[in-house]
Amino acid sequence: MGSRLEAEVLLAYILAVDRAQLLASLPDELPVAAWQRFRSLVARRTAGWPLQYLTGRQEFMSLEFVVSPAVLIPRPDTEVLVEEALRLLPEEGNPLVVDVGSGSGAIGLSLAWYCPGCLVVATDSSRVALRVARLNAYRLSLSDRIKFFHTDLLEAPRRQNLRPQLVVSNPPYIPSGQIEKLPREVQFEPRPALDGGPDGLAVYRELLPQAAEILRPGGYLAVEVGWNQAAAVTDLVRAEKVFGTSWIKKDLAGRDRVVVARKE
């Protein structure tokens, strides 16, 4: 997105209009308060703040989500994970889905939106992130079909003896040593949502055994992976023994993006 377009987005946000309305009726002179706020946001954007944190919004799966620096910004690559998860869910009944590391709730709430029969449990270790996810559930009128747990990975669902049809997650998978090399904008996102340990696979090593335990027979695990991690994550899946068929889905750029496995 070019700097002029970003400026238009910020100005439209300040004036509480969409961009088309802004371009159609741009005021000759901004009120002083609006001008000062605009300058402040432009300064923060110039300093590297992601545009989504400045407007507090991000589109994902054609839905609008509230975002804040407490949550990872939903990305188009993750839509591949959601689309594959939707394909795995039965068309009838009320399948139970567990969204691990929910963040803004984008994955779990998108599944609830596009699979009207499914029930979603969302977990996150951050209470602040869960507040954002609950707000998004309320805004999408999905609060009655999603339950939130403040917990590490699948600990709470295990204690509740839940037996989901699908466990889905976009876990942290950036190797710790590479985080400082990421684009400046990414540095503003919460490190726990990025840092996957020395080799980027630390969370998978914890998550996979837990998923293998609680998934019902015939259920699925679907996880997003880094572009060069699919083979390693597939090896971890196979090491759990209970998973039979597994496969890899590529993103629109042709890179490995999602690993899926079916429990025998």
Image (cartoon, rainbow, N blue to C red):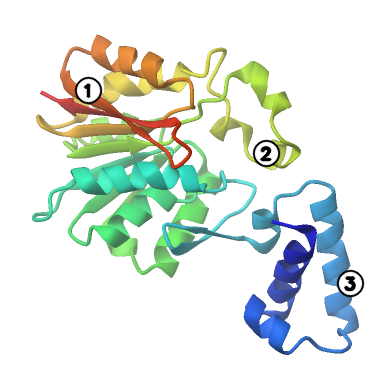
Earlier in the chain: of badge 3 and badge 1, it is 3
Q: Quadrant of the C terminus?
A: top left
Distance of label 3 from label 2 (alpha carbons)? 26 Å
Give the residue displayed 72% in from the left and 25% down from the top.
180
| Amino acid type, residue under disc 2 in the picture | Val
Please provide percent x and percent y for residue 112.
29, 57
Helix, strand or loop at mark 2:
helix
Displayed quadrant of residue 110: bottom left
* Above or below: residue 168 compared with residue 120: above
Please provide percent x and percent y for residue 28.
87, 89
For this view, does 214 lie left or right of residue 45?
left
For this view, does 15 lie left or right of residue 195?
right
Residue 194 appears in the rendering: yes
Displayed quadrant of residue 115: bottom left
Please provide percent x and percent y for residue 191.
62, 32
Specify the label residue 186 is tagged with: 2
| Amino acid type, residue under disc 1 in the picture | Ala
Give the residue displayed 70% in from the left and 50% down from the top.
50
Distance of label 3 from label 1 (alpha carbons)? 54 Å
Give the residue displayed 41% in from the left and 66% down from the top.
138
Distance of label 2 from label 1 (alpha carbons)? 32 Å
What residue is pinned by disc 1? 212
What residue is pinned by disc 3? 36
Q: Quadrant of the N terminus?
A: bottom right
Toward the front, the furthest residue is 254
Please provide percent x and percent y for residue 65.
50, 60
Displayed quadrant of residue 139: bottom left
Give the residue displayed 69% in from the left and 72% down from the top.
13
* Above or below: residue 207 compared with residue 146: above
Residue 149 appears in the rendering: no
Q: From the viewer's perspective, is the residue at label 2 or at label 1 nearer? A: 2
For this view, does 112 lie left or right of residue 34?
left
